[in-house]
Amino acid sequence: MAYPELIADPIVLRLLGLLTWAVLLAWLVLYFGRGHFWRCSERLAAVIAPPPQWPAVVAVVPARNEAAGIGPCVRSILSQDYPGSLHLIVVDDQSSDDTAALARQAAAAVGASHRLQVLRGQDLPPGWAGKVWAQSQGVAAAGDVPWLWFTDADIQHGETVLRRLVAKAEGEQRVLVSLMVELSCQSFWERLLIPAFVFFFQKLYPFAWVNDARHRLAGAAGGCMLLCRDALERAGGLARMRAALIDDCTLAGLLKPMGAIWLGLTHDSRSLRAYPRLDEIWSMVARSAYVQLEQKPSRLLLAVTGMTLLYLWPLLALLYGVLTQVWWLWLPAAVALLLAWRMYVPMLRFYSLPWWWGASLFPAAWLYTLMTVDSGRRHYLGRGGAWKGRHYS
């Protein structure tokens, strides 16, 4: 049987139709049944009732060759409008640039040198991921303090962020409060891929489920995490997650059994790291995508199959259904595409992008699928988990 005759065969068309209706059903489940992740409704309130007493906080910033962003980061932390005690520890993870000097200059510029400690990071022990090792040194130097604020060296925070984080944590008795900071979204590749990155993260870790103490799902965003020191110690400390490359969600999983956690979006903390080129975003994703799949080929196959069915098949089914005038093929495909588009609009609004940019979700998904495959390839070539000159495969 020739190929054109095969795809026009009634039995084949029915099978394709069933597949397309199944994909539509999957989108309906995502729309209604996954914590309404796409609504982007989990935000840190602008005003939160203050606690009876403002606790002491130590911010810990691991920094390895972060000269480009460490200055604004340090200034934003030490300039927080926080009524309680706030100190900052920058763990200079053996940088080869001026990270340490620029951190000190930034603290001096805001008259807060006495609240900054710059640690020279020790050699990385076997079995530890670099960032977690740097954080553990900062935690050890922080002393007996009730709250730790983990943030990255390329993040700039609004002046009320810490006050609201602490009020949220204290008022709702949460052991971890985390913010998905606003990522850079200026270049073409950023506009194509960054909103989709956050959308897919929300789909993996629906914030409403993360924030529900009754739900087992745990997630966090490493750019901004306020955590209870006592809960961390009760959970076994950072040594229990020493090898974690996806350190934020691993930490959330460690802490959620100790108490409620919370994760939300914000415009008030933003990343200073720009990704003007595709290869920069590609490297960021390929570094850890296969780790997210627990480095299992079966999970990689399932992920690729799922992404293909959700983001590529509806387009193919719509095109073929229109060409063959088979309504029960093009109709579910069109509804699935419109539903996906509708779900993407709140994220587009968050990043001040027009509604019609929703069409970019589909090519973005194809690119992320290729990045995930490449992540697996790098793992088996011994180049997986590369970050800041280190490989963790």
Image (cartoon, rainbow, N blue to C red):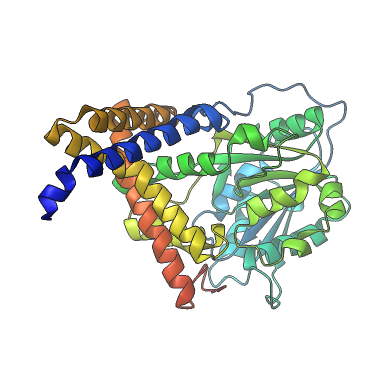
**What is the total number of numbered labels drawn onto the structure image?**
0
In this view of the protein, can residue 351 be seen by the observer?
no
Quarter-of-image position of residue 317: top left
Is 276 above or below relative to 212? below
Is 184 above or below relative to 98? above
Nearer to me, 316 or 91: 316
Question: Quick one: quadrant of the N terminus?
Answer: bottom left
Q: Residue 383 location, x and y as percent?
A: 47, 75
Quarter-of-image position of residue 60: bottom right
Q: Residue at x 49, y 57 (%)?
A: 68
Nearer to me, 53 or 218: 218
Q: Residue at x 45, y 62 (%)?
A: 286
Nearer to me, 135 or 217: 217
Image position of 211 (left or right of 38): right
In this view of the protein, can residue 296 be seen by the observer?
yes
Q: Residue at x 40, y 52 (%)?
A: 305
Q: Residue at x 39, y 28 (%)?
A: 345
Q: Residue 23 location, x and y as percent?
A: 38, 38
Q: Residue 322 location, x and y as percent?
A: 16, 32
Q: Residue 335 location, x and y as percent?
A: 32, 27
Image position of 119 (left or right of 35): right
Question: Quick one: quadrant of the C terminus?
Answer: bottom right
